[in-house]
Amino acid sequence: MNKATILLVDDDQAFIELLAMRLESNNYHTLRAYRATQALKILQSESIDLVITDLKMAHMDGFELFEKIKSDHFAMPVIMMTAHGSIPDAVDAIEQGFLNFISKPIDSQTLLHTIEKALFSTTKPQPSLQSNNYFGISFKSAAMRHVVNHIQALAPNSVNILIQGESGTGKEVTAKAIHQASGYASGPFIAINCAAVPAHLLESELFGHKKGAFTGAINDKTGLILSADNGTILLDEIGDMPLDLQVKLLRVLQERTVRPVGSHTEHKINVRFLSASHKDLQQAIVNKEFREDLYYRLNVVSITLPSLRDRIEDIMLLANQFITELCDQRKSINPQAITHLLNYHWPGNIRQLHNVIEHALVLTPGKLITEEIVLKVLPAQHERHFQGLNEAKKQFEYDYLKKVLSLSEGNVAEAAKLAQRNRSDFYKLLKKHEIN
């Protein structure tokens, strides 16, 4: 069984080393940060299960660190320790969200018991983030790790969630992950695209109808909301729902009951409502195209998905996943072809990447997807503003450095090797372009 990774944060280096020895002797893996800013950097690059931080530290104290952790790592359990232990400190820590409070000097048995309790209390039926796959969401990028952390924190609750993002960014996949990580996982997951169903049929699809309720209603029909009872329903492209139907949906959300078209009977429901849209719903409210009261009912909390061009670290992970899914035999992509995939702007996001890989596989007789095939299946790039030579060189160098760093996952030494430059020159280039 893999033991948890614990990040220890304290500006007392001798103390933190001793604490790490205690934990590692009990088969925990530890990482150490001697100041809060260092801890935040580690959290961006490593998979951490628990943070134990001192309260009193120079530059940034434990409470401020906790607030910054929660802004990016919603589900991260945090334990506070302090030599200034007191009941007010403990109460304040718990009220602000710390899982527990330990006073220095720290008793080993108390420490181990507190850690086990913290890890147990935050255990969910979820895969490890180290696997790069979270209930169907494949990722390596920090942008998607932020999304997954958000899902981990929100999924166990029953609050309504609005998922936003461009078309093709994986809103339905995200909704399924929320469902599978929630207490509704044993119930059905039902998705309906509000833009794909004709407006005059959408009410019947959602709420159901009684026989004879309208022309063509030759049988009773159970609506999708009632079919999703004890489970989750995703209202995809909710921004395209007609205004008159928005009023009826609002009533369902308020009363937690559904009445089929033509019926006088109300049916109680226990449904988790998720909604998704690529539209700016707040602008739609201004344009009188979407009800403000419904917006706030659906958007108790929101998750915004990044575009594929903002998570280029995930492109090859997703491409290889699609190859495995679509092809019986193992195929790969040559390095020159990979460069084109990484440089493309992907206006259709993940959905477009899937289509490109599928098309490339059809045209690949052997085991290697070549540069020529990728160029053939990639749509022509949008023309960019014509730049002067110096400006173009500078932009190319900046983009090149960022791509190399992405391929090396931030490892500067490895990036320098890929760029065929010595490390000193590579650092100078990073400084020149103000790349961190």
Image (cartoon, helix red, strand yellow):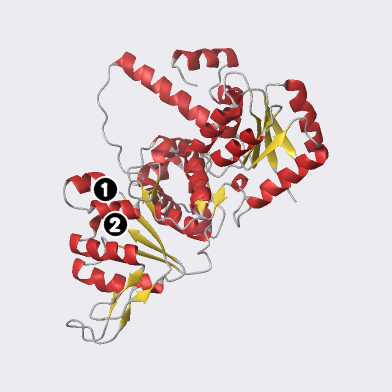
Q: Which residue is mark 1?
A: 281
Please name the amino acid that badge 1 sits on: Leu
Element at label 2 = helix
Please name the amino acid that badge 2 sits on: Ile
Q: Is residue 20 above or below residue 180?
A: above
Q: Residue at x 77, y 31 (%)?
A: 19
How far across and how far down the image is residue 56, in percent? 64, 24
On the picture, is 246 further left or further right than 72? Answer: left
Any part of residue 418 in sight: yes
Q: Is residue 117 above or below residue 106?
A: below
Q: Residue at x 45, y 17 (%)?
A: 434
Q: Earlier in the sequence, mark 2 or mark 1?
A: 2
Q: Quadrant of residue 386?
A: top left
Q: Residue at x 62, y 34 (%)?
A: 88
On the picture, is 16 further left or further right than 163? Answer: right
Element at label 1 = helix
Q: Are marks 2 and 1 in contact (CB under 8 Å)?
A: yes
How far across and how far down the image is residue 198, in percent? 21, 67
Label 2 crowd (10 A; few <14 / some 14-19 / many >=20): many
Q: Nearer the viewer, residue 75 or 44?
A: 75
Please give the count of numbered marks on the rendered protein: 2
How far across and how far down the image is residue 6, in percent? 69, 38
**Residue 414 tag number:** none
How far across and how far down the image is residue 316, in percent? 50, 43
In space, the residues marked 2 and 1 are separated at their CA atoms by: 9 Å
Label 1 crowd (10 A; few <14 / some 14-19 / many >=20): some
Q: Is residue 70 above or below residue 84?
A: below
Q: Which residue is mark 2?
A: 238
On the picture, is 58 further left or further right than 155? Answer: right
